[in-house]
Image (spheres, helix red, strand yellow):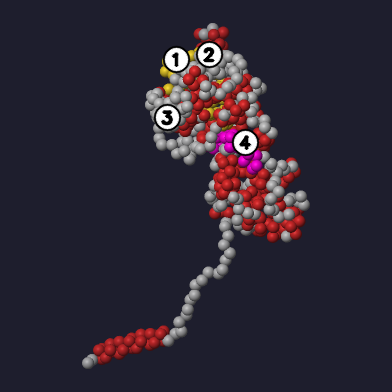
Amino acid sequence: MNMLDLNNKLMRYILYASISLLFILNSCKKETVFVYEVDPVTSRKDDINKGIPKSTVEFISIAYSDVFGNTISQNNLSRLTLLYLAFGDKRLIEDLLVKNMLNSPNVSLMSNSQMRSDIPGFVQTIYSRLFNREPNELEAFSLEKSIIDDTELTPELIYYSMMTSDEYRYY
Amino acid sequence: MNTDTTKNMSKYIPRRDFLKKTAMAAAATVVAPYILPSGRLFAATGNRVANHVVFCLFAGGIRNIESVQKQRGNLMPSLLSGGASVDPIIAAGMDSLPTIPGSSLQSQGTLFNQFRYAQGPTGHFNGHSTAITGSYTLQDLNIKEPPRNPTVFEYYRKHSDPNQSALNAWWVSNTLGPYPSLNYSTYPGYGALYGANYMQPSTLISDDGLNALSNPRIFSSSEGEKINSLRNFFNDSFAIQSQAEGSSVSNGMNDSDLLQSFIRQQLINAQNGQATNPWGVGASMNGDMYNVYYAEQIIQEFNPELLVVNMQGVDICHSNFTEYCNNLRKADYAVGKLWQTIQNTPGMANDTILIVAPEHGRNLEPNTILDSFGQPAIDHTSDSTSREIFCMVVGPAGKVNQGLVINDITGESIDIVPTIGHILGFRDSIPGGMLSGRVLNEAIV
């Protein structure tokens, strides 16, 4: 055995030893546990995603529920649907239907004093009820300000404005 | 022409001739661009025969045999001249109707005795669609969708200059089913934006209509301002505002108010009994007559430039021939009343052309059903007789040829839309190739 072979063996030994030591050291390291999860959020519909117009039946039944607070009967829904079909300008007939609903003695709207006793609450409630979403900050601020600034602005006018708006025709 | 040339020419042409030719050349330079390919000097719009057209689809399937050929007597005394008495076999099944005073409509216009519904299935909706679009329905029809080709209402509203509002264009149908969709098409570039106001009176002006539509909350003007302000705010916040338009015909805010008032008034009139027997014919009043009555209300209220109204009571002929004849008389009476109303309506009297045509005919051979008078019923299944119809164009002397009867085969269903376009002055503005029919020039002075 010459010196060159001896050095090679020594180097190989040192290499094996180093690798073994590395494995031993790593295997002794405490394992880190990663846990992935989602924070709890409240889901709500964004108006940007409202792209589907309500059908005749949907519009009438939803409007009825929004104004009267209960579900329209199948018989009444069928009758109103036929009326809806009998005039070409759908927006006009929707407008007339909503105005008639709002003029009914059975209407279930918040009173003016109730609205003014908790304006932010009213704004949140009406957006949720009619637009099926929460208002953004600008919308909430603007509507609250309108109600505060104009003492003659009633829940009925706000209902009517929202129910005859573009957004109310979509879901 | 430069100065030197002018000087040179003036050496050889007498001064008067030179000035005359120069003036003519200048005039030609100005006028030439306005000469249309049709040879007319001015654009079609504004060059009208009359300012109003009422098209009565005398529909439900009517054979020439019972109408213009009068084989069972003159069942259409308001439209047709001549006093041929009604066949006694069916006379007992006829309801009593008064005579409308005055001369027949035939004497006040042009009658095409051999008109044709030349192509497509002899179905009611096919026939209506053809008459209203000016295009035969050679492909399958989807009755849940508007027609593929533009309707006469869209041609009228799009190609009139200035564009006409929906308040000027009306489609009044006697039933729902697929008929509400005939007020506009799906044709690119046309559609709801140019559609007609549509009304189906027997459903709208009803007890249900009274309950649901007659008692609206009326807002004051100050409330209206608040509402508009709020609604604009909500609309501005909505990302797809533009898509809210175009899903139906739409009237502007002022026109919408007029229409709502009109609907409410009709509901109140009906509640008060004013529409129960409006023509004084008692129990003879049928659905067709009510439909025409409400078309009259529209005429009196809005003076529309284009109104299409239909009747289909004669379709009972599938099971009852005598009642078919009875309803034919009622339809005739309704058209007589319609013309009377037009002539009594300021703004439309002497400035309206009435077109009357069935959508298709009925078969030559009857089916096996007999009515109580022993008369066999008749279907319509596209035989050659079911394609034979008539057309009458009625209007003031000087606009429509009076008392003219055309007995040879002349005119087709698809000619009615171009004829309306010609009368109202927008025919030449419709792009070439969209309408294959022709103007019924035989009728127009």
Q: Secondary structure at mark 1?
A: strand
Name the residue that disc number 1 marks.
B407
Which amino acid, mark 3? Answer: Ile
Q: Chain of mark 2?
A: B
> Which residue: 41% across, 36% down?
B140
Q: On the same chain: label 3 and label 1?
A: yes
Q: Secondary structure at mark 2?
A: loop
The percent position of residue B106, horizontal first and vertical second, equals: 53, 16
Residue at the extreme left:
A1
User: Looking at this view, is B379 or A91 the one in front?
Assistant: B379
What's drawn in magenta, residue-wise?
B191-212
State which mark lies toward you, 3 or 4: 3
Name the residue that disc number 2 marks.
B83
Label 1–label 2 contact, CB within 8 A: no
Tell me the CA gap for discs 3 and 4.
Answer: 35 Å
| Disc 4 residue crowd, few under 14, some 14–19, many 20+, Cα 10 Å | many
